[in-house]
């Protein structure tokens, strides 16, 4: 055990998980690569849990942060803040939500907390609809709506949560249906559920479930849900903490794959916009955002140094069409991984879109999750010089692949080759 690992275990909670039997300390990065404290170089296909969205040590972001740090780091929301207003203007325009207002937080958890506060206050209801296999953060209220047992340490909650079918296309009672039949069955289930409860405040849903293993419904499911919800005044919260900013390639926001019935009422974001800086937030129609009748501030949400990072990062993303790069390079990567998966008995499914890809592992010849295989592949990939993630609502048996959106074709091929070797090493 390394000295740093021993010190970590002595002062941090047991439930703060670490990857790898021999945890690594990442000391620095550049582009799509990082280095550990022993000098080993890795191709990074997880980006600090989808947070390093553009690149490590991106010069444009580094320069913006340095210049802002030389002026002022922080003043709170009690004072006018030019970088915060400028970033809010950009996000409001990009969100697709009419008459949008933006509130900044420091994380996706806090963003979802805020969205829940707004929705329940606006609707005068503490009943929430959420998706099975979902994850929305680690706060008390976010845990209360998380539909993933591995990330839900308590059943206590200020909310009454009802879980809806549909977030996982290839498991569950409707898996054998066609896409159209799947959507129809999930809509029927939603209608039936609404007939047996008091009116909910909102449905919160990730367009692609992140911690759940990068699972998703057929395109259009949430548009069909939206029609049912809108008839009853129930709000739709799109949790875009992992899917936002062009990561899915086909769309800037994940909700746009379900946009037939219009944009969500609220949208939460975090992770990639800061490229490592602590930025989260909520976008909502003005009438919803302004429904609170008590004072509120954010000490650190919207602080100048993180807003400078977010502005520089967003500008780089848009100017270099990283959404288009995610679509092109991600398309090549998923086809490469599907070709490998077809030859490895442990691989049940390769799924996802853009640079948000999942590889689900099972015990060969069954549908039974194999978390040991996922851990073994994680270790083998590291040994080969590749960092990936894992997740999944069925015993954490899915590999999560989410490189920075500036990934090159050559780097995609290199990572796929390392991952192929790791998958083929499974007994």
Image (cartoon, rainbow, N blue to C red):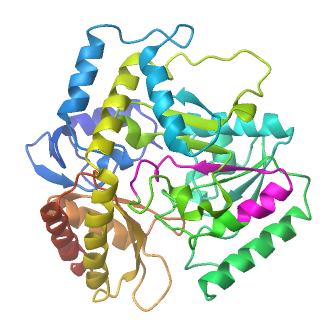
What residue appears at the point 37 percent right and 48 percent down from the top-left corner? 49
What residue appears at the point 49 percent right and 21 percent down from the top-left corner? 85
Residue 336: horizontal and vertical position, in percent? 25, 77
State the image quarter where residue 67 is shown.
top left
Q: Is residue 388 visible to the viewer in this orientation of the structure?
A: no
Q: Quadrant of the C terminus?
A: bottom left
Does 253 sit above or below residue 340? above
Residue 362: horizontal and vertical position, in percent? 43, 80
Going by the image, does 298 lie left or right of 354?
right
- Count of marks, rendered view: 0
State the image quarter where residue 170 is shown.
bottom right
Q: Is residue 90 visible to the viewer in this orientation of the structure?
A: yes
Magenta highlight on residue 311? no
State the image quarter where residue 282 is shown.
top right
Going by the image, does 35 lie left or right of 361?
left
Q: Quadrant of the N terminus?
A: top left
Which residue is more in the foreground, 17 or 7?
17
Does 418 sit above or below residue 321? below
State the extent of the magenta-drawn residues as a range.
225-247
Going by the image, does 417 lie left or right of 128?
left
Residue 397: horizontal and vertical position, in percent? 43, 69
Which residue is more in the foreground, 402 or 146?
402
Does 79 sit above or below residue 3? above
Residue with the most extreme bottom position? 365
Which residue is more in the foreground, 379 or 91?
91
């Amino acid at each position: 055990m390394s000295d740093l690992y021993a010190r970590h275990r002595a002062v941090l909670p047991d439930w703060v998980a670490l990857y790898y039997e021999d945890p690594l300390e990442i000391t620095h990065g550049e582009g799509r690569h990082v280095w550990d404290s022993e000098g080993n170089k890795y191709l990074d296909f997880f980006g600090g849990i989808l947070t390093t969205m553009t690149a490590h040590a991106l010069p444009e972001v580094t320069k913006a942060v340095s210049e802002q740090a030389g002026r002022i780091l922080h003043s709170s929301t009690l004072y006018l803040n030019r970088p915060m207003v400028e970033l809010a203007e950009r996000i409001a325009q990009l969100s697709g939500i009419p008459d949008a207002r933006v509130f900044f937080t420091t994380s996706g958890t806090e963003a979802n907390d805020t969205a829940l506060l707004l929705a329940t206050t606006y609707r005068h209801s503490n009943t929430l609809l959420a998706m099975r296999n979902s994850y929305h953060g680690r706060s008390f209220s976010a845990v209360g709506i998380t539909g993933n047992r591995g990330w839900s340490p308590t059943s206590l909650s200020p909310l009454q949560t009802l879980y809806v079918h549909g977030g996982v296309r290839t498991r569950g009672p409707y898996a054998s249906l066609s896409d159209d039949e799947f959507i129809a069955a999930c809509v029927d289930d939603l209608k039936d559920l609404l007939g047996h409860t008091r009116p909910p405040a909102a449905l919160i849903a990730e367009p692609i479930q992140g911690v759940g293993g990068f699972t998703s419904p057929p395109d259009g499911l949430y548009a069909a849900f939206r029609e049912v919800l809108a008839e009853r005044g129930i709000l739709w919260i799109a949790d875009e903490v992992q899917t936002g900013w062009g990561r899915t390639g086909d769309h800037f926001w994940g909700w746009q794959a379900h946009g037939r019935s219009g944009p969500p009422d609220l949208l939460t974001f975090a992770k990639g916009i800061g490229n490592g800086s602590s930025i989260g937030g909520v976008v909502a129609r003005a009438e919803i955002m302004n429904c609170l009748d008590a004072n509120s501030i954010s000490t650190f949400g919207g602080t100048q140094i993180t807003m400078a990072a977010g502005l520089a990062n967003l500008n780089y993303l848009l100017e270099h069409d990283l959404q288009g790069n995610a679509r092109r390079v991600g398309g090549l990567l998923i086809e490469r991984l599907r070709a490998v998966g077809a030859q490895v008995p442990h691989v049940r499914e390769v799924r996802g879109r853009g640079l948000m890809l999942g590889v689900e592992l099972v015990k060969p010849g069954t549908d039974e999750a194999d978390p040991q295989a996922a851990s073994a592949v994680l270790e083998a990939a590291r040994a080969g010089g590749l960092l990936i993630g894992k997740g999944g609502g069925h015993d954490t048996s899915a590999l999560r692949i989410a490189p920075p959106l500036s990934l090159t074709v050559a780097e995609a091929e290199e990572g796929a080759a390392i991952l192929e070797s790791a998958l083929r090493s499974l007994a």
